[in-house]
Image: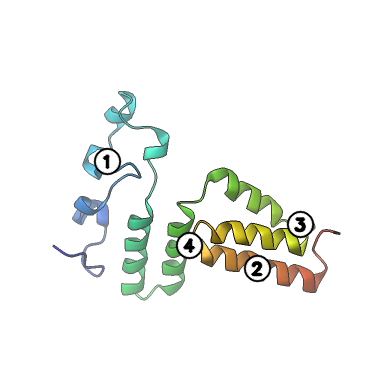
Amino acid sequence: MAFDPSSDYPLGTRRPDLVFTPGGVPLARVTLDAVREGELTAAEIRATPATLRMQAEVALAAGRTQLAESFERAAELAAVPDELLLEVYTALRPRRATAAELEEWAARLDGFDASMTAGFVREAAAAYAERGLLADG
């Protein structure tokens, strides 16, 4: 049966067959007992890009475009290593990075197909330049 964003929400209740961990474990097998027994690691208890994109479709079907955009950004960031996200977050603090450094961060994000977030970093660089918030190069 095809996914229907207007009637399949909440996914975990109505369409658990569509929800998997990053390693492919079905939602029905994500239990506290599985964690206790070492069958699942912390890395397995994360939303996948596919699930986040379905959530975006649900939000769009409900007319919540900003929420849908947030889910889309989350979907693209799900594949970005946590360390890189923390480094970009730090670089985005005022006066922490030059325009060139922010462009390098954006290019790295593009390499992970995180174009929405890379665009955000580029917008931040432009806004920081306009307001004098870039680091001295």
Residue type at numbered disc 2: Arg
In the rendering, which numbered label is found on residue 25? 1
Q: Look at discs 4 and 3 and give the one toward the viewer.
A: 3
Mark 1 → mark 4, Cα distance in angstroms:
23 Å
In the rendering, which numbered label is found on residue 73? 4
Q: Is residue 72 above or below residue 13?
A: below
Answer with left or right where residue 9 lies relative to residue 65: left
Residue type at numbered disc 3: Ala
Q: Which residue is mark 2?
A: 122
Mark 2 Cα within 10 Å, few/some/many (few <14, many 20+)?
A: some
Image quadrant where residue 44 sits: top left
Q: Look at discs 4 and 2 and give the one toward the viewer.
A: 2
Of 91 and 104, nearer the camera is 104
Tell me which residue sits at (31%, 73%) in the image: 61
Q: Please, which residue is most extreme toward the left here? A: 1
In the rendering, which numbered label is found on residue 91? none
Dot 2: element: helix
Dot 3: element: loop
Mark 3 → mark 2, Cα distance in angstroms:
12 Å
